Amino acid sequence: MANKGRLTTGIFCLFLAGLLAWHIALPDRARSETENRTLAQFPDFSWETLKNGSFTAGMEDYFADQFPLRDDWTGLKARCEQMLGKREFNGVYLCGDTLIAKVDEPDRLQMEKNLDDVKRFGEASHGRVLLGLIPSAAEVWKDRLPQGAPSFDQAAFIQSAAEKTGLPTVDLLGALTEHAGEPIYYRTDHHWTTCGAFYGANVLLNALEKEPLKETDFTPEVASMDFNGTLYSTSGIHWLAPDTIEYWASEDDLRVTSWKSGKEAAGRLYDRSYLEHKDKYSSFLGGNQPLCVLENPAITDGSKLLLIRDSYSDSLAPFLAQRFSEVHLVDLRYYHTSVADYMAEQGIDTAQMSGELLTAIFSMIAQKESEAISENIRWTYQKKMKKGSFITCKAPFGYRLVKGGLEIVEAEAEIIRLIFQRYLNGRSMEDIAKEITRYGIPTRDKTPYWQTTSIQYVLHNEKYAGDSLAQKTYTTRTLPHRKKRNQGEYDQYFVPGSHPAIIDRELFDRAQALLKQKGAVIHPKSGVTYPWTGTVICGQCGSIFKRKKCRESAYWTCRLHDKSPDKCQITQIPESEFERAFLRLYYKLRHHGMPVLSQLLTDLQTAQNRKLLWSLDIVELNKQIADIVRQERLLAELKQQGLVDPDIYITRSNTLAEQLRTAKLEKERFLESEEDQTIRQTQVLLEILETGPEFLEAFDEELFSELVAKIIVENNECLRFRLINGLELTETIERTVR
């Protein structure tokens, strides 16, 4: 009996040893395409990480993610859990041969904000606006859900949204429920099928008083019979038969223009290259993009439709284009200018809102996609920071980026040294800023004027001493993403000597001591006579305000009103009212506005990342890099097997290394050239507020010029401040002179 037990133990140990050897022999994977997520990598070892338990936890995650045949084991686990009666797998319900995503109740505050935004859009637009919210399969097929399965009441929400926005609605829920017995949603994906999009298009066309479409008008083409969607990846249920993707509308009948790369280019109704990849649904119009226009030359009545879209609209739009001369699709996740203005410019008199505009209430894939992208970026940056190789994509003044590192720009470096010398010699930041401005040297952002905050930023920046401190801030992992100052939530990574220093370390330390002693306070600027010149604009006629004096009191007046009061009704405003309004504005921004600006910055950065991810240039460069890496691996395998001559190996290896370096450098240059001005301006705005005083006892012209670009006098009771990043806030005029 004892021998039998030892034999069993020995076999089990051999089994474990075999798995371990297999694990060691296999290369680590960065991602699981089956699960559609980033996999854990081998953790960095140190005595500190060993003591605090992070190394052990990291090893557990590593072995779990890199386990041989993980995808097969994951599927087996899900199969066993199913046999034990489980019906929910990672937020996905197994309903016979169909997967249905669980939809949780959205955040109430965020929901109210989104509905307010929709209402304002309806009020601001130049044409008729309809509200059409696309329900998920969890609502239409709720009778298929496991007994007792909780699910958010989407029908009640749709009714509530209609009441709160006051907009006429399109009954997409009723139309889809009527055809609930048909394959209107994919079995392994959250999207509706082409069949479901057809029914959705008809109910929308009916609401727009257009002739409905007939199924007999189309000849379905089977594009793929091997589609495993998002729910397949999320759930771990990999034994269901794949979905079939169909194209109904003809490619020959419609002309597509795409702004996927941020520039106008010819698009495709069906981008069949996606059929070779996992994300086959993106073959409709080529997937997510800020703006896309479908034109139908056969429709000559000039009718235009604007669709505020989500991913559901990709398969919907080809049907709508059968009845409109033009269909314009705008995705607010990537499109950041005024939609109402776009409608007016394009002569669009009808708009339709749908889907993920309301924070992906019905389709949680928007959050999942965003989280996946953020996680990929976060993982890459985290690894670089730990290795001490992480550098921001924008070099500070005094440096330029060269092959991912910082290189000194000597002409700019002289200015940095002058700033430190002047400050240590007792000069104020304000005086230093004036001196550099007089030299005619612009900032890195090409601004001709140096500000006090610019000087303060230089004096505090550890990079000028040759060091780097990474992860000063972090972005929350769940929607809505928020950028927060790191106060110990995550590790910060200090890398001494990461790049050439401009300032001697002893000199830098002396400056930090002096800054600490003085408290780095930005003192109000005084003595400037006309802070509003060229800044105040009449909201009625567009004229610039001019300054006048009456009995020792200064006031500003619209130039047209001053010439002819009957042509413009905006009356004169005391100068003191502008000052008081700015003080109120500053208080609100400093004490209540920074979280809003942080959220705006995060949204802009996320949108920029998404735009770059979908950029055709980036996609092509990523393909080139991946192809070169594959060639390098194949070459290494051939050498290991003795199938390639050593001289040929060296020559070919060097060639591939040079090609890889060139491709990565080109990608780096493209990313640097695509920096968004609004993002930079919002970052500057936050920096000014973070370093500015808590309260302003008197008007500060310096702060005003740094924060505000324009003041629009809406009427005799209201001022609209346009901040440097384009954000506009209103303040009431408490007293006007008539």
Image (cartoon, rainbow, N blue to C red):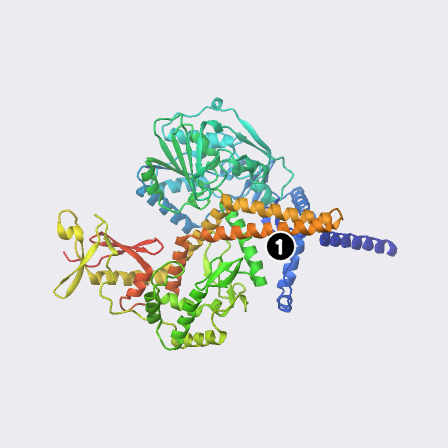
498 or 340: nearer the viewer? 498
Where is residue 545? Give x, y as percent.
20, 55
Q: Image check: 716 left or right of 105? A: left
Q: Secondary structure at mark 1?
A: loop
Quadrant for the C terminus in the image: bottom left
574 or 136: nearer the viewer? 574
In the rendered image, is residue 235 in sight?
A: yes
Quadrant for the N terminus in the image: bottom right
Q: Is residue 523 above or below residue 562?
A: below
Residue 390's quadrant in the figure?
A: bottom right
Residue sticking out furthest to the top: 216
250 or 79: nearer the viewer? 250
Residue 695's quadrant in the figure?
A: bottom left
Q: Image check: 137 left or right of 418? A: right
Where is residue 25? Give x, y as percent.
73, 52
Q: How many marks?
A: 1
In the rendered image, is residue 67 in sight?
A: no
Q: Residues within 10 Å of mark 1 (few under 14, many from 20)?
A: many
**Residue drawn 59% across and 37% down?**
276
Q: Is residue 493 above or below residue 239?
A: below
Which amino acid, mark 1?
Ala
**Residue drawn 48% across and 73% down?**
504
Where is residue 587? Give x, y as percent.
32, 63
Q: Image check: 542 left or right of 455? A: left
211 or 180: nearer the viewer? 211
Which residue is disc 1 drawn over? 40
Where is residue 162? Give x, y as percent.
37, 40
**Residue drawn 58% across and 59% down?**
383
